Image: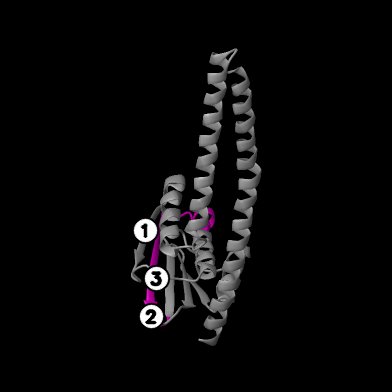
């Protein structure tokens, strides 16, 4: 509980710093891009005003160009406001489903998700590391396991979140922790969790992740 509390405090600080950095980035983009576009629109309108008496057709074209520039600038501002309003929170299940859909289309793998947690809420750092771990498992299925199907089960026992990622690949009797598995193990342990693996020749490969979550 103490470790989870410390993790939550650190996560909130990181999230706040990330939000500030993102807002500063967006503000810079508005200043640079939108500011430039509006300045261009003003110059175009001024040019059109000069032509209004002598060349109305040319003036009308310039006014139309200025209108288009302003409309683009307005859309850029709206997009920036939406980006700020949406915040930096990462919904784990939503992002996981996006990944499953994309990976299925791009690789031809059959990926199946069973979520028994009813959309559990995780800290941003937990969501990020768990998503990275699941992606690594799917990559390993393609690179090493030669599997065609991946099953992802998410469940909860008391204050622990359990995730299993299993494929129907060729399996192995000698499991070697290379860079990918070692990195995954370190990431999971960094948020107070554990990682274990299981495999047999011809029986596929399974990775089990267990992390502490808020017990409320």
Q: Which residue is mark 1?
A: 112
Which quadrant holds residue 23?
A: bottom right
Q: Reading the chain from its start, which is encountered first: label 2 or label 1? A: 1
The nearer-to-camera label among 2 and 1 is 2
Which quadrant holds residue 182?
A: bottom right
Q: Reading the chain from its start, which is encountered first: label 2 or label 3? A: 3
The nearer-to-camera label among 3 and 1 is 3
What secondary structure is found at the residue carrying circle 2?
A: strand
Which region is colored magenta? 138-159
Placement of 18 over or under 36, stated as above or below: below
Q: Quadrant of the C terminus?
A: bottom left
Label 2–label 3 contact, CB within 8 A: no
| Residue ID at (58%, 68%) | 16
Q: Reading the chain from its start, which is encountered first: label 3 or label 1? A: 1
Residue 31 in the image, given as x and y percentages of width and height: 64, 46
Q: Which residue is mark 3?
A: 120
């Amino acid at each position: 509980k103490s470790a989870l509390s410390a993790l939550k405090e650190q996560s909130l600080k990181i999230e706040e710093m990330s939000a500030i950095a993102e807002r500063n980035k967006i503000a810079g983009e508005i200043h640079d891009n939108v500011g430039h576009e509006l300045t261009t629109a003003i110059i175009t309108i001024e040019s059109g005003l000069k032509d209004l008496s002598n060349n109305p057709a040319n003036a009308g074209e310039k006014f139309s160009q200025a209108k288009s520039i302003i409309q683009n600038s307005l859309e850029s501002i709206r997009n920036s406001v939406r980006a700020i309003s949406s915040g930096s929170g990462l919904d784990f299940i939503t992002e996981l489903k996006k990944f499953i859909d994309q990976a299925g289309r791009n690789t031809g793998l059959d990926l199946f998700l069973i979520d028994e947690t009813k959309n559990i809420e995780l800290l941003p750092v937990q969501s990020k590391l768990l998503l990275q771990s699941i992606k690594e498992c799917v990559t390993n299925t393609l690179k090493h396991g030669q599997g065609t199907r991946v099953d992802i089960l998410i469940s909860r026992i008391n204050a622990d979140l359990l995730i299993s990622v299993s494929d129907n690949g060729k399996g192995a009797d000698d499991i070697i922790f290379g860079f990918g598995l070692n990195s995954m193990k370190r990431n999971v342990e960094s948020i107070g969790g554990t990682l274990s693996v299981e495999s047999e020749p011809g029986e596929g490969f399974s990775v089990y992740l267990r992390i502490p979550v808020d017990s409320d």
